């Protein structure tokens, strides 16, 4: 009897100990509701950061990421109706309505002067502004020591394999523009001599109509230079700092390397006269159709308007940009939204003009015509009527087979010789190249690619009949222009 009782007592003790141990373990593994929520948020945040680091800047966003974007940033889907909450950085930089405008500008200039003094490049002293001395980037190569007082300033940034594409871009500008062109080229050291040699190879009749200045890629020291340089595409963010680097220039047109001019730069430049007193830059919308828009569907940060902006063609009033909060704001936005931006500098520009809509002049899609305007259906109505003024071959469509109509036009410009007749050579080649691709999405609208060239030719014929031709075929009184072979690669 006694052994049985001892056995029962032992079993009871073991069961009680097991219950206590189970209770303790179970209790420690059950976090409270707030801890659970915080844990989930941390997991989501960690996964979001990991996904952002792995992003290759494509539109292939999976369903999980879409659900996160919608749940976290539904407010971005319609900026006009649901404005995202303005964070502390916005309050510091922009909510200064109680301060006189003059004082705000003076403060901005002091910030920019501080950044200027830390610039990581060779500079020269320039004029004073607001009591602070500004500096200007010294070119590595230049065509002249005395830059023309008048002329149209065109800036481009080239890195990697973008040299040849940039030269075709600059050629297209020369072909249609009568006024003096002043090129500002920011390039990696490996490309600089190549640009200089190509310009020297151009005929004298062309060289006397242009000036060029070639600069190092330059970013403010101590501002995470490597991150800026690699933002989206190599060197793409360089354009954000142009107001700081070219302090002795009032205004210029910045373009990406994948641009072709189908009309004179004079007509592009005329848009400056349409700026009001607060506008300091001009950009075109990213999309015309909300159903195909990227920003309104996927952006995780503030953006301009309902469909965002494309930054590939940008008129810049540098004087006004230097007097604004442009540079300190962009640096602050980069710190704030670094893990949420996909398209690099373009996203930062969108954020800036979301907070400063009064500083932007929006020009229509025909001034920045891209595959997005015709790849599904024709959505740029103005271009159907007038033709495209500027062609933008984004996503490398000038060099691949994704949009053969764009490549057809680019090849015609690439193969065109200086001095060859624009009508019988360039225009006829464009039309010839477009014929085999008429069944492609954008090839269905060939007049969009040719109408402005035809308009230019017609205008020059009118000038010729009236006896006021202005060296259109690059002829001078003393020498007739002769076609030259293609420059060496």
Image (tube, rainbow, N blue to C red):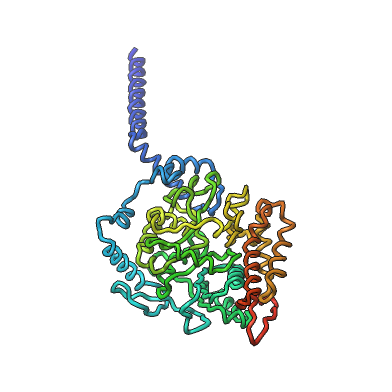
Residue 123: name its quadrant: bottom left
- Taking the spot 60% from the left edge, 77% from the top edge, the residue there is 470
Q: How far from the left and from the top, in percent, is residue 264?
A: 57, 68
Viewport quadrant of the C terminus? bottom right
In the image shown, does 6 or 57 lie closer to the viewer? Answer: 57
Q: How far from the left and from the top, in percent, is residue 29?
A: 37, 34
Q: Residue furthest bottom?
A: 478
Viewport quadrant of the N terminus? top left
Q: How far from the left and from the top, in percent, is residue 128?
A: 33, 76
Residue 42: name its quadrant: top left
Q: Answer whether residue 204 is visible to the viewer in this image.
A: yes
Quick check: 108 left or right of 163?
Answer: left
How many dots with numbers?
A: 0
In the image shown, does 167 or 68 lie closer to the viewer? Answer: 167
- Taking the spot 44% from the left edge, 40% from the top edge, the residue there is 71
- Taking the spot 74% from the left edge, 58% from the top edge, the residue there is 435
Q: How far from the left and from the top, in percent, is residue 204?
A: 61, 83
In the image shown, does 349 or 123 lie closer to the viewer? Answer: 349
Q: Residue furthest front?
A: 466
In the image shown, does 389 or 377 lie closer to the viewer? Answer: 389
Residue 95: name its quadrant: bottom left
Residue 197 against residue 355 in the figure, above or below: below
Residue 337 against residue 112 in the figure, above or below: above
Q: Answer whether residue 227 is visible to the viewer in this image.
A: no
Quick check: 62 left or right of 19?
Answer: right
């Amino acid at each position: 009897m006694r052994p049985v009782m001892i056995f029962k007592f032992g079993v009871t003790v073991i069961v009680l100990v097991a219950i206590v141990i189970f209770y303790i373990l179970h209790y420690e593994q059950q976090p409270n509701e707030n801890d659970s929520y915080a844990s989930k948020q941390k997991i989501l945040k960690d996964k979001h950061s990991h996904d952002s680091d792995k992003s290759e800047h494509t539109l292939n966003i999976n369903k999980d990421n879409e659900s996160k974007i919608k749940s976290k940033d539904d407010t971005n889907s319609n900026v006009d109706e649901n404005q995202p909450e303005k964070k502390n950085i916005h309050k510091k930089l922009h909510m200064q309505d109680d301060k006189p405008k003059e004082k705000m500008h003076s403060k901005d200039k002091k910030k920019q002067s501080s950044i200027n003094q830390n610039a990581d490049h060779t500079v020269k002293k320039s004029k004073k502004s607001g009591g602070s001395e500004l500096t200007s980037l010294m070119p590595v190569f230049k065509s002249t020591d005395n830059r023309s007082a008048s002329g149209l300033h065109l800036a481009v940034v080239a890195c990697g394999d973008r040299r040849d594409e940039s030269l075709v871009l600059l050629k297209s500008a020369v072909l249609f523009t009568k006024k003096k062109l002043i090129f500002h080229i920011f390039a990696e050291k490996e490309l600089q001599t190549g640009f200089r040699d190509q310009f020297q190879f151009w005929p004298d009749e062309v060289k006397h109509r242009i000036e060029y200045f070639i600069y190092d890629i330059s970013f403010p020291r101590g501002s995470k230079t490597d991150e800026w340089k690699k933002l989206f595409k190599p060197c793409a963010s360089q354009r954000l700092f142009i107001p700081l680097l070219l302090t002795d220039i009032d205004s210029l047109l910045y373009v990406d390397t994948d641009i072709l001019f189908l009309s004179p730069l004079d007509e592009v430049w005329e848009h400056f006269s349409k700026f009001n007193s607060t506008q300091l830059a001009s950009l075109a919308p990213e999309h015309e159709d909300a159903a195909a828009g990227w920003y309104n569907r996927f952006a995780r940060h503030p953006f301009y308007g309902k469909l965002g902006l494309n930054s590939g063609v940008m008129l810049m009033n540098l004087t006004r940009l230097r007097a604004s909060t442009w540079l300190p704001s962009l640096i602050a936005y980069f710190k704030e939204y670094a893990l949420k931006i996909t398209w690099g500098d373009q996203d930062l520009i969108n954020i800036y003009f979301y907070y400063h809509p009064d500083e932007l002049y929006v020009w229509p899609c025909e001034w920045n015509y891209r595959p997005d305007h015709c790849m599904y259906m024709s959505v740029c109505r103005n271009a159907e009527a007038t033709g495209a003024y500027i062609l933008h071959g984004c996503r490398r469509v000038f060099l691949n087979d994704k949009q053969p109509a764009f490549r057809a036009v680019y090849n015609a410009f690439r193969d065109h010789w200086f001095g060859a007749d624009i009508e019988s050579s360039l225009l006829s080649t464009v039309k010839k190249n477009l014929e085999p691709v008429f069944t492609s999405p954008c090839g269905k609208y060939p007049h969009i690619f040719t109408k402005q060239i035809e308009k230019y030719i017609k205008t020059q014929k009118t000038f010729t009949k009236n006896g006021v031709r202005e060296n259109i075929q690059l002829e001078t009184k003393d020498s007739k222009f002769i076609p030259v072979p293609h420059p060496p690669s």
